[in-house]
């Protein structure tokens, strides 16, 4: 679990937002509209995210998301559910 937290921390908050939308099949234009930033800024965030995870392309970012972020979010949701009951 600790290793997963370290992996997630390699991305900035904005990079994580952009990668999340990319993983949800948003286009660059859709991401830019959703986050109210320019398409070039979206591209820069994706480039920074790829460098941070040592990925080669956008596919690497989507794989990263599903192997790390989505799984971690699911773990956190299950922990919240357990503490509420």
Image (cartoon, rainbow, N blue to C red):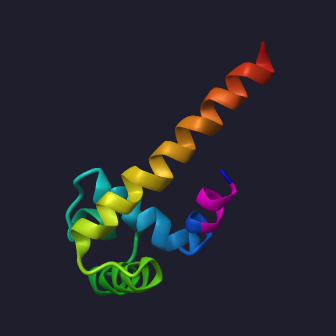
Question: Measured from the top left, where is residue 28 in percent x and y?
Answer: 23, 70
Residue 26 versus residue 56: which sits nearer the camera?
56
Q: Is residue 3 above or below residue 36?
A: above
Q: Is residue 71 left or right of residue 32?
A: right
Image point 33% across, 81% down: which residue? Answer: 38
**What is the quadrant of residue 57 in the picture?**
bottom left
Q: As displayed, is residue 38 above or below residue 26?
A: below
Report the front residue among 57 and 37.
57
- Report whether 4 appears left or right of 33: right
Residue 29 placement, left or right of 23: left
**In the rendered structure, which segment of residues is drawn in magenta?**
2-6
Tell me: residue 79, above or below residue 5: above
- Total labels drawn: 0
Where residue 15 appears, as percent x and y from the top left, is: 47, 73
Residue 51 visible in the shown view? yes
- Residue 34: tell me if it is visible: no
Q: Position of residue 68 (x, y in %)?
A: 48, 54
């Amino acid at each position: 679990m600790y290793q997963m937290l370290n992996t997630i921390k390699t991305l900035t908050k904005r990079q994580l937002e952009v990668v999340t939308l990319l993983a949800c099949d948003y286009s660059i234009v859709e991401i830019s509209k959703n986050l109210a930033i320019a398409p070039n800024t979206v591209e820069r965030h994706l480039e920074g995210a790829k460098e941070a995870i040592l990925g080669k392309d956008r596919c690497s970012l989507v794989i990263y998301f599903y192997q790390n972020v989505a799984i971690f979010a699911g773990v956190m949701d299950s922990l919240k559910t357990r503490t509420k009951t």
